[in-house]
Amino acid sequence: MTQAEWEAICQRCGTCCFEKKIDKQGIVHTTAIPCRFLDIHNRSCRIYSQRLQAEEDCIKLTPELITDLKWLPDGCAYRDYIK
Ligand code: SF4
């Protein structure tokens, strides 16, 4: 799979780009606080090609990482793809 094919799986919902909080039970809660680089109107990253350099918490999603990233939201197209 090419990088373009991999990235085409994303549905651009932007849900992964909101801050998360993990409670004492380990349950992940998505907050209403977006990443400072997220365009909340079209739900896309405003600095996509530089995101990894500009935001230290940003993670490049790969097939190998998806199953380990428990904070990815239900309904994320990558989670559905890897199942
Ligand atoms: S939650 Fe998944 S489908 Fe939605 S923007 Fe993030 S990576 Fe793409």
Image: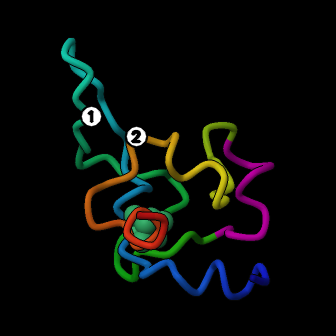
* Residue at image mark 2: 70
Report which quarter residue 25 is drawn in: top left
Amino acid at circle 2: Lys
Instruction: Give me the C-alpha separation between circle 1 and circle 2.
Output: 8 Å
| Of marks 1 and 2, the one in the foreground | 2
Residue sitting at x 58%, y 87%: 8
Please provide percent x and percent y for residue 7. Answer: 63, 79
Q: Are marks 1 and 2 in contact (CB under 8 Å)?
A: yes
Q: Which image quarter is the N terminus in?
A: bottom right
Query: Residue extending furthest top?
Result: 24
Query: Which label sits on residue 73?
Result: none
Residue sitting at x 69%, y 38%: 56
Amino acid at circle 1: Val
Q: How many marks?
A: 2
Look at the image and tell me whether residue 8 can be seen.
yes
Relative to 5, residue 14 above or below? above
Q: Which image quarter is the C terminus in?
A: bottom left
Please provide percent x and percent y for residue 38. Answer: 48, 64
Give the camera-side residue of 24 and 66.
66
Is residue 21 rendered to the left or right of residue 56? left
* Residue at image mark 1: 28
The residues colored magenta run: 47-55
Label 2: which secondary element? loop
Relative to 58, residue 41 above or below? below
